[in-house]
Image (cartoon, rainbow, N blue to C red):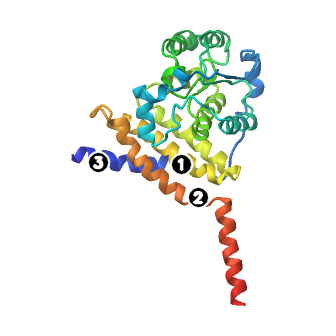
Amino acid sequence: MRFLYRCRLLLLIVLACITGCASNTYTYTTGRAEIDNPLSPDMQQQVYVGTPHKVLDASDWYWIGSLLGKLVLLNPKVDSHEISEETLSYLMEYVDKNDLENVQILVNTYKPGLQFKRLFRNRTVGAGWRFTVGFYSAVMYAAFPGRFFGGDHYNPYTNTISIYSDDYAIALHEAAHAKDLGRRKRKGLHAFLYGLPGAALYYEAVASSDVLSYMKAESMDRERKHAYRTLHPAYGTYVGGTLIGAATSWGFAAGAIPGHITGNTAAAFVQDESEKEDAEQKVEDTSAAER
């Protein structure tokens, strides 16, 4: 019990220190577009949206992995397989403002052929990485279709974002991974490092912080509140899996608990524009009444 208590306390400290950092300054774009553009695969279109399917689109309510994701994050839109125009609008605005024109975006669809094609032609990542770890990632994509199993993710070897959740914070988080890897010179090495035990904590923190800083720069206060409540527990699952995953079978879920605490706490300190206007109006009304 003491071990678990200490782990939870450590989780709170880690989450409070690493995530939730919305910087006062925000850097748009990767700064490498001119270098990477000639090395990137050609695209007929950037966004592919899957055709609605009643059975597949309902898999989030009978596939245990999706159900656990909803439960752990307390978010029914996780792996919902029905992506709204609002979520796509938030995603594409982020993509446009950060010059991620070479990133392929797959929305609730299954395109293994396209993924293998992009794997072979994506020269922004070294061939040694693409034809080993990258090939494995493409095989896993083909063998376990996210169209059924869900699992929003970014694949650096094919430079592709796959979205299955109708949540703009999650969508922007995956796009932030694309931006983060896009600004790095040795993309293949960083993609490989991400898969090492504990290393994902760094890359996940970078992506979450980028989303929160972007929302702050864009004065998206309402959205930033939601992002805190979503990204903190999501990050907590990584911390929990790293720190106590080996000791317990529920490490990922346990990590989300302090994430919910820190996320809601951080969100409470964000005052959106409507709240600011209401507060200012109350001050004006009070001053007028006193006169």
| x then y, percent, for residue 64 | 39, 27
Q: Are marks 1 and 3 in contact (CB under 8 Å)?
A: no
The residue lying at 69 percent from left, 35 percent from top is: 85
| x then y, percent, for residue 219 | 69, 53
At mark 1, the secondary structure is helix
Q: Give the CA distance from mark 3 to mark 2.
A: 29 Å
Instruction: Give whichever of discs 3 and 2 has the lower sequence position.
Output: 3
Q: Are marks 1 and 2 in contact (CB under 8 Å)?
A: yes
Is 250 rendered above or below residue 259? above
Which residue does the numbered mark 3 point to in the structure image? 6
The residue lying at 53 percent from left, 48 percent from top is: 228
Which is more toward the observer, 64 or 99?
Answer: 64
Q: Which mark is residue 228?
A: 1
Q: Which mark is residue 270?
A: 2
| x then y, percent, for residue 246 | 30, 31
Is 9 rendered above or below residue 132? below
User: Which of the two marks, 3 or 2, is nearer to us in this view?
Assistant: 2
